[in-house]
Image: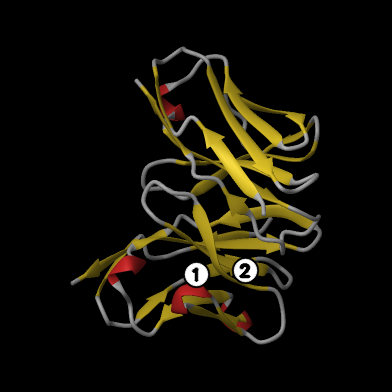
């Protein structure tokens, strides 16, 4: 069966520090991978998605970046965190080229920037 | 691009009462529609989805949703709410040949004893 992992589960970082959040998927090949941010009291905002290794689409210009160094690994990074980067970060995966195929979500990472 | 609106930010219902959560979408053709549920501090779990065919869709945990093209709606319903249903509910819309999915802002459900 397929599983998705995210770590760390929680993170507290000072403003201006770097960030690296990792997401890995097991039990499937060539998944589509997604990073979402959920700010307090708001819905899910799609940040990045990837349909293959090295292929990244950015939805929202910001100081975050994403990379996909391996088929089932998706990394969210920042060189210098801002206060506004605080939120709940969710990684998700799906298969196929149609969004009829549901997305499966990881447990999320709670990021607090102080 | 497609979009989805959930008009109610927060709803409170008594345990055992019926529930309806509203969702309106914007898209020129037939969309794919989803309802997800998120328990506090957790990821999202799919409740149900609609692609085509019967406009009344049954999901897990006793939920159902009805697609109404004329109203561009996909409201989620449950005849009798349980305390464990307290969570945040997200409606989402996807389109054919595009693996991009857009989520609504969510509706937080509180269940009173």
Residue occupied by mark 1: B23
The chain that hosts pointer 2 is: B
Q: Secondary structure at mark 2?
A: strand
Colouring scheme, one of rainbow, by chain, secondary structure, one colour: secondary structure
Residue B22 locus on image (x, y percent) = 45, 72
Is residue B60 in sight in this rendering?
A: yes
Dot label at residue A25 = none
| Residue depth check, mark 2 versus mark 1: number of the one nearer the observer | 2
Q: Compare marks 2 and 1 and give the one earlier in the sequence.
A: 1
Q: Is residue B47 left or right of residue B19?
A: right
- Report whether residue A64 is seen: no
Q: Residue furthest top?
A: A16
Identified at 78% across, 36% down, the residue is A71
Q: Which residue is mark 2?
A: B33
Dot 1: chain letter: B
Crowd around label 1: few <14 · some 14–19 · many ≥20 (10 Å) = many
Mark 1, secondary structure of its residue: loop
> In terms of image quadrants, where is residue B88?
bottom left
Residue at the image point whose x is 62% and y is 68% from the top:
B33
Q: Looking at the rendering, which quadrant does residue B96 occupy?
A: bottom right
Marks 2/1 in contact by CB < 8 Å: the verdict is: yes
Q: Is residue A9 left or right of residue A1?
A: left
């Amino acid at each position: 069966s397929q599983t998705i992992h995210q770590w760390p589960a929680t993170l507290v970082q000072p403003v201006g520090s770097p960030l690296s959040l990792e997401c890995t998927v097991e039990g499937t090949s060539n998944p589509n991978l997604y990073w979402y941010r959920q700010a307090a009291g708001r819905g899910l905002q799609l940040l990045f998605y990837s349909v293959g290794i090295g292929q990244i689409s950015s939805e929202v210009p910001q100081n975050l970046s994403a990379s996909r160094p391996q088929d089932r690994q998706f990394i969210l990074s920042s060189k210098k965190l801002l206060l506004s980067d605080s939120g709940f970060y969710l990684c998700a995966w799906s298969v196929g080229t149609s969004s009829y195929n549901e997305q499966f979500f990881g447990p999320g990472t709670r990021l607090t920037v102080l | 691009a497609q979009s989805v609106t959930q008009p109610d930010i927060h709803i409170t219902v008594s345990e055992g009462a019926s529930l309806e959560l509203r969702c309106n979408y914007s898209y020129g053709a037939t969309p794919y529609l989803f309802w997800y549920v998120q328990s506090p501090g957790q990821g999202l779990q799919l409740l149900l989805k609609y692609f085509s065919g019967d406009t009344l869709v049954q999901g897990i945990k006793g939920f159902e949703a009805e697609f109404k093209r004329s109203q561009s709606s996909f409201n989620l319903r449950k005849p009798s709410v349980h305390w464990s249903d307290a969570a945040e509910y997200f409606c989402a819309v996807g389109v054919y040949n595009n693996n991009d999915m857009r989520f609504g802002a969510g509706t937080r459900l509180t269940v009173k004893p």
